[in-house]
Image: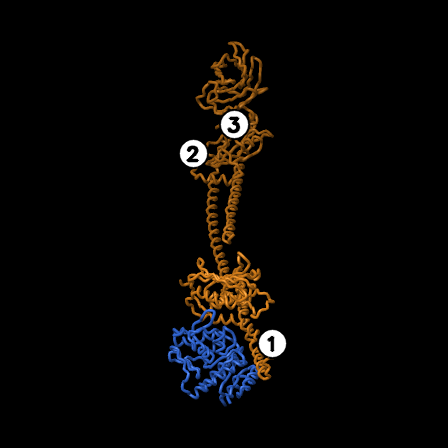
Chain colours: A orange, B blue
Amino acid sequence: MKLRRQLLILSLLVLALPLAAWQFVGELEELLRQALSQAQQQALQAVAGNLQQRQARMQDLYDKRRALYLQPLPAGMQLDGYGEDWPSIAPQFQAEGLQGWLGRTADTLWLRLVLNDSGFHFSSPGEQQGDGLYLWLQQPQDLIRLPLFWEGLGQGSLPLPEARRLEYAVTDLGGEYGIELRLPVLALKGVALQWLDDGKPRLRLPETGLWPLTGYDRSLEFLLAGHAGAEARYWLLNPDGWVLARSEPPQDPTPDERPWWQNWLYRLLSGPLDLDEPPSGQRWRLQSRAIEQARNGQPAVEWLLEPESGRLATLAALPLKSGDAVVAILVSRQDNNRLLTLAANALRQLLLVSGVVFLLAVLILLIYASVLTRRVRRLKQAVDTAWHEQHGLNADFEPSRAQDELGELSRAYAEMLGSLGQHTRYLRTLADKLSHELKTPLAVVRSSLENLEMEQNLGDSTYLRRAQGGLARLQRILQAMTEANRLEQSIQQEQHGDVALSDLLGEYVSVARATCTHCRIEADIQPGLHIRGAAELLIQLLDKLLDNACGHCPPDGQILFRLQMQSSAIVLTVENDGPPLPEEPPPERLFDSMVSVRAHGSERDTPHLGLGLYIVQLIARFHLAEVRAENRAERQGACFSVYFPAKASVA
Amino acid sequence: MKHVAIVEDEPDIRANYRTALERQQYRVSDYPDRPSALAAFERELPDLVVIDIGLGEESEGGFDLCRQLRQMSATLPIIFLTARDSELDEISGIRLGADDYLSKDASINQLLVRIAGLFRRAEAFRQDKPEEEVLQCGPLRLEPERMRVYWQAEEVPLTVTEFWIVHALARRPGMVKSRDQLMEAANIYVDLATVTSHVKRIRRKFRQLDEGFDAIEAVHGMGYRWKAP
């Protein structure tokens, strides 16, 4: 993976920043919420304390804790046995096969029952044998019992004391019967009823005694009003959740104009905390998780998000206890929209800031990565160039002055290349120096031998001849050693001219056939190829290539000169049948100074110092050509090629 | 008796050369360094001087000595001995006025041949003989006795060795002379590359007079020939 991509991936870590900040805001928000909840609960405690100081009220609440609630009913109720006009769907009391609702309008008491009785029998007029009800009504002074037996579906009535009447309606609800009763309001204290099935008592509610009654009590409102405000409302509920008293609803609760995404963000933020829907139920009965919990004796707080208005609110519920019994529940609802706005704003800020920081960080890292990559790449290129020039004439490597590790690396490279260059230069001049140093003692030996020969007239002396033979050999070695150096010095003064390479090679091969006798020399020359260069140097190059090929070619082997125009180069190839190139040194090193792969024991007159192919390379470089050594693909043998650039050629 | 002076810092070589030269009936005086040689030359000029370029501490003492000698005499034949091949180019480049130069690889015989040649040339000048055997080949004019070469009537400052090479080529224009033949003619038995560099230097000298000089032609793989006009 490239450095730049690595850093880019690393920069993704910056994404942790908004994540952490998100977490932080979330925690902050939770803390805020806890503080708000506590404050709300404390306010609730204050109300409760206020109420608990009033013994009579508490006693009353205690007495009526299981009382039946007379729910306030809207005006215009129809006496028809159907329950559509009743606000509360859930029954207020129920027993096996019986569900009941109780309510009142300003001047009338309403009772609705649904009886589930498969064999419903109507009574004959005046008899009491069918299905029916006994209804006990506790008045301040006396207890009256009303027998209720109906003779069929529809409405009927019963006389009551003080010239009042109880009206009722029976209707078939399909397997169930709906019974609705209406009677003028009496100062009722309690109520009980008994269901008679075919004249026999089936069940009585309550089983003994009477149910006390309770209802909305305006005299309790003042306790709540003091605490209520624009953003807080209070309710006093009986343990069943029926509203005993409430503060005035806040004036004009305008729905907030907030973008949808704030709610969405808030939901995202508050994650694990469930935001409940507002308490269900009607005006007169509140139901929610917190209230349910309070009924079990535990104070509770829940957070609500109203789906339509998008308002955030807190619902706190506090049970009022007398002894162990919960006698009432205090509920407050606090509008906490500001919190939502606050959190959403904080989040928006956070996202904005962290987004900007993220982009900035990525940008900076990208730039940094680019700079770093460029530096590394430049270093690599410089090393490459220097490395290649190393084999050429001058290695020019500018070390970086940067103080960091890359700078150090660059300097280390400079040092390494420097000493390598020194070594290369040393190797290159070694032959020259060595030959120079050896020449003087050689001259001493030679002149002495010559004098000896002349003076003693030992023209035919075997020893003298051997000494001269050895001397000549030494001299050849020295010449071979200095040849490359001399060429290097003189090559700069050579001039380029047009060379008919095809013709030159043809002539060369014909001469070479005459001189090289131990192998066959073949040629495959594409005619008419010209290059710009120096003919004498090219002859020297051919000499060296031929010499090299001869040296490796077995007796009666074949040496093939090939000259071809390839796509962008004129390629001169000399192949021989000799052994393949060794693995070590690598083929490109064969053209370096003093690299030889010939067997040491080879008994030949001419010395091999690994300079022949170096001269080939020198001359090739003068012609801007490239040299290559490789093994032949099709059959055994090595192949040395010189690629002359075609653009330098002249058609 | 001709008087030959040898300036050479290596005592063994000096002694060997001295012996060889004395055998040839030359009067020989030898000096190990430049100051002693110069002091002697100021007293008496020899007939010919053989100078080693590197003289002990002075790596180019030979060049300095040559320059000083030339101030004393414009005609004194001087032969350089070199240990480095690169110095050959330097000599021709500086053109100090040496009459010939020889690598230390060369044998004593080659040195003797050159000394004899130079004496012959000097003799021809002194006698101021009428040009007997002048070789004219296009713009080239060769005077073998004086070992002088003219190109388009201008003298080309060739050394003795170079003269012999040009002579060998121009005597048979159009005929290819191999490097071996040229070596033989020039009395150099060193290596083929030396012939090549000699030919290169000869061309350079001609080209200093005539930019378009191309009379010496390389025949690939074989040798050189003088292009017939």
Q: Which residue matches tag 2?
A: A252
The answer to which of A288 and A404 lies nearer the viewer is A404
Give percent across and percent down for residue A500. Answer: 42, 65
Q: Quadrant of residue A568?
A: bottom left
Mark positioned earlier in the residue sequence (3 or 2): 3
The image shows residue A352, relative to residue A599, as above or below, that is: above
Could you tell me which quadrant the C terminus of chain A lies in?
A: bottom left
**Viewer-side label of 2, 1:** 1
Which amino acid does the dot numbered 3 rest on?
Trp
Question: Callout 3: helix, strand or loop?
Answer: loop
Q: Residue at x 43, y 37 (%)?
A: A256
Between circles 1 and 3, the one closer to the viewer is 1
Q: Please say whether residue A408 is visible from this viewpoint.
A: no
Image: A398 above or below B212:
above
- The Cα–Cα distance between marks 1 and 3, rounded to whole angstroms, is 137 Å
Q: Are marks 3 and 2 in contact (CB under 8 Å)?
A: no
| Separation (CA) of disc 2 from disc 1 | 131 Å
Whether residue B180 is situated above or below residue A328 in the rendered picture: below
Q: Are marks 3 and 2 on the same chain?
A: yes
Q: Tell which residue pokes out farthest to the right in this image.
A: A463
Camera-nearest residue between A571 and A615: A571
Q: Chain of mark 2?
A: A
Q: Which residue is identified by label 1?
A: A466
* Image location of residue A38, percent across then percent down: 54, 38
Q: Amino acid at mark 2?
A: Asp
Residue kind at label 1, given as amino acid type = Arg
Q: Secondary structure at mark 1?
A: helix
Q: CA distance from mark 3 to mark 2?
A: 24 Å
Q: Residues within 10 Å of mark 2 (few under 14, many from 20)?
A: few
Q: In front here: A429 or A572?
A: A572
Label number found at residue A242: 3
Q: Where is residue A418 drawn, in percent x and y?
A: 53, 66
